[in-house]
Structures are given as structure tokens and as C-alpha cells.
Amino acid sequence: MPQLMAEETFTLNKIFDENINRKLGIALVGLGRYSEEQLGPALKETSYCKLTSIVTGTPSKVEKWTKEYEIPPRNVYNYDNFEKIKENKDIDIVYVVLPNALHAEFVIKAAKAGKHVICEKPMAISAKDCEAMIQACKGANRMLSIGYRLHFEPHNLEMMRLAKQKVFGQVKKVIAEDGMNLPGGTWRTDKELAGGGPLMDVGIYCVQGAIYTLGTNPIAVTAKEGEKTDVERFKEVAQSIAWTMDFGNGVTADCKTSYAENMNLLRAETDKGRFELSPAYAYKGIKGRHEMKDDMYTQPMEVEKIKSQQSIQMDDFAKCIMNGTKTKVPGEMGLRDVKILTAIYEAAKTGKKIPLAL
Ligand code: NDP
């Protein structure tokens, strides 16, 4: 089986040799639901970074945010004057939390303004855009990471450990499902802004979950789009899609995603039984269990308690910048995943098995 992407050398100098006491300043770009309900609150819990700036196209949001997070007026930007962040020393990191199709433009502008970047998933709506984003950050010698919060979540880390250490034997199969019942009429069902439907949005967690559980990249995919029972709501994007990732040596991951059905599962099967998370991809309340054939009982998965995945994720990135070390969720991982999503769409469209060269 192919190994995960080769480690790349990272040449960034430590940015704080002497000034390590200062928390790195983060600018949130796009004050939608994820920023408001998750990232903002998580930034109150971080130790190595804090919210110092906001970028929004909605002036009515400014008062609440600036009051709640004590952000001075000079650190408030909109999408037209965004590039002026270049002159602002209060901003070290730009966190792009916009609709998917806008990620590339703002990541590239942030890098050109000399800022490190966190970009939400999916990294972009095409591999070409992802490559341009990586190049822009490399060219500016800035770090780029993707908002893959589950790489910092104890249950998902435990899935990786159990599989890697073969605690219950070799994982032969992964089952991954992520879906929700989404109301229509938002950018998420607008093909131009979203780039696709549930696969781009939540199905990406199944791709991620299968890969980090198996610790290796898939070599091919097959896929089938589900029937549209609500043609009006899903005029532009798929309602659901099911796909299988082939990891070689008979190891597969069966996955599905939907914008019309609630699902949330990451399961690993071995000869002895299975271990799984359900819900697997939530912000809170993730639960895990082992169910082995020779054991009468289902055992709950015990892991350490954390405050929030997002605060750990953002602190980790800040520490990478401070120490000049690499992030474990780099732009290259975002690019890999967008290549896989693209192949899944192609497989669904053509009915063919699409090989992957990752
Ligand atoms: P929302 O629709 O809640 O917010 C998006 C925000 O983007 C808007 O509020 C607006 O902010 C800004 N925006 C700028 N241009 C547009 C436009 N043309 N149409 C709509 N909004 C626009 O989305 P989310 O916050 O849920 O998602 C944002 C990104 O974060 C997506 O890429 C999504 O995939 C990702 N995400 C990641 C999650 C995770 O767990 N890692 C969870 C949820 C989302 P303003 O008014 O300030 O300009």
C-alpha cells in the first residue's frame, strides 16, 4: 500500500526567538456560523493565539464582535480592503472561513500580505486552486494548514492508534458515513460557491476518517450518486453519494454522505471485531466503543477530556509557527483530499473505477 505523502522540508525560521510571550494574532475572515459558534468561542480558550481582527462583508456584525473580543476599530476589515492587513502587525495568522469557492482567493491574498494561513475544508473547489494556494504560501515563506480539527480530537486520535498498533488486529475495512438534513437556499446547495454538494462539505470527513484510520492513501475509487428525492432543493448539487475507496491488498472503505439524511459513523473492522465512533465527526459528544467477537460486552472507548478541538487545532498551528515546525494538517493534505473528491465525482459520473496517483 502507498504511504502517506512524503514529509516536505520546511524552511521557515522561528518567528519568535525572544518574543515568545506574545500570543499570535488571528484574523477571522467570514463571520458565519462556524466562526460565530465554534472558532470565536474556541479563541477564548487558546493559549498561543487570540482573536485580534475580523474581516466581514456585513457591517451589522461588527459591533457585537468588536465588543465581545475587544477588537480595536483599526483591526476591522472588509473583503475590499482586506489586502491592507499587510501593514497590520496585530495579525500573524489569517483564518479563512468563507464559502468553499472563495477560499483560494483569500488564502492567496493572505499569503501575499505576509500572513500564515489556516483555510477551512474543503481547501478549495479544484486541485488547481489548491496548488496555487500552496505555491502562494511557499513563495511567501508562510505556513498553510487546513481546519482539520479531528486530527486534534482524542477519540479520532484513538482510532488512529488502535489501527496503527493493530490492537485488535489488522483493519480490513472501514465504514464511514456523514450526512445531515440541510435546508435549501444557502451557498451550500449553490454549485458555484460550494463546488459540490454533501461530498465537499461533510463527505470529506469520511475520506479523512478512512485515510487516518488506515494510515495510507487510497489507490482507486468507485462511486454512485443517490437518487434525488427533493429535486427542487438539490437542483445544482447531489443529494447523496456513496463511494468505495480501494486501499490495495483487499482493504477498502465504504463511505456515504447525504444532505437529506443524518449519519455520523467511523467504523474499523478487523478479523476479531470492530472499533468505532458514532457520532464520529461532531464538535462535541463524540463516542467510541470496541465490540470484539470473543467478548460478550461492548466496551466504551476511554479518552482524555478536552475543552474544544478547535482551540487545540489553532494552538497547535501557532506553536508550529513559533517553533518553525511543520503542521500535521498542511495544504498538501487539503490538496490530496480535493483530488480524491474530484475522482469520486468522476467515478459517479462515468460509472468507472478511477485510479488515484496521490
Ligand atoms: P456560513 O454560511 O454560516 O458563513 C459563511 C460566511 O462567509 C458568511 O456569514 C459571510 O460572512 C461570508 N461570506 C462572504 N461571501 C459570501 C457569500 N457570497 N455567500 C455566503 N457567505 C459569504 O458558513 P459556515 O461558517 O458554516 O462555513 C464556512 C466555511 O467553513 C466553509 O468552507 C465550511 O466548509 C467550513 N466549515 C468547517 C467546519 C469544520 O468543522 N471544520 C464546520 C462548518 C463549516 P460575513 O457576513 O462576515 O461576510
Image (cartoon, grey):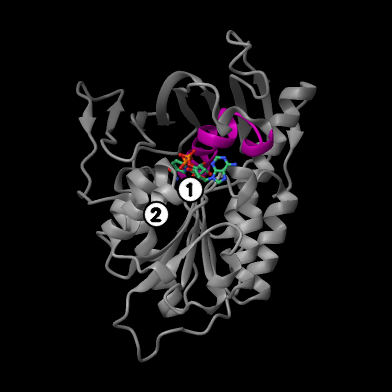
- Residue 203 in percent (x, y) is at 54, 32
250 with respect to 214 (left or right): right
Q: Amino acid at mark 1?
A: Thr
Query: Residue 240 or 336: which is nearer the viewer?
Result: 240
101 with respect to 68 (left or right): right
Q: Is residue 355 magenta?
A: no
Q: Residue at x 44, y 24 (%)?
A: 180
The secondary structure that most of the magenta stretch takes on is: helix
Q: Is residue 197 magenta?
A: yes
Q: Which secondary structure lies at badge 1?
A: loop
Q: Which residues are magenta?
A: 192-215
Query: Residue 281 or 222: which is nearer the viewer?
Result: 281
Q: CA–CA distance between discs 1 and 2?
A: 7 Å
Residue 208 visible in the snapshot: yes
The residue wearing badge 1 is 58
Q: Quadrant of residue 293?
A: top left
Q: Quadrant of residue 11?
A: bottom right
Label 2 near label 1: C-beta < 8 Å? yes
Q: Residue at x 76, y 23 (%)?
A: 349
- Residue 138 in percent (x, y) is at 65, 72
> Is 245 above or below relative to 63?
above
Q: Is mark 1 within 8 Å of ligand 1?
A: yes
> Is 36 above or below relative to 294?
below
270 with respect to 127 (left or right): left
The residue wearing badge 2 is 62
40 with respect to 268 (left or right): left
Residue 4 visible in the snapshot: no
- Residue 343 in percent (x, y) is at 71, 36
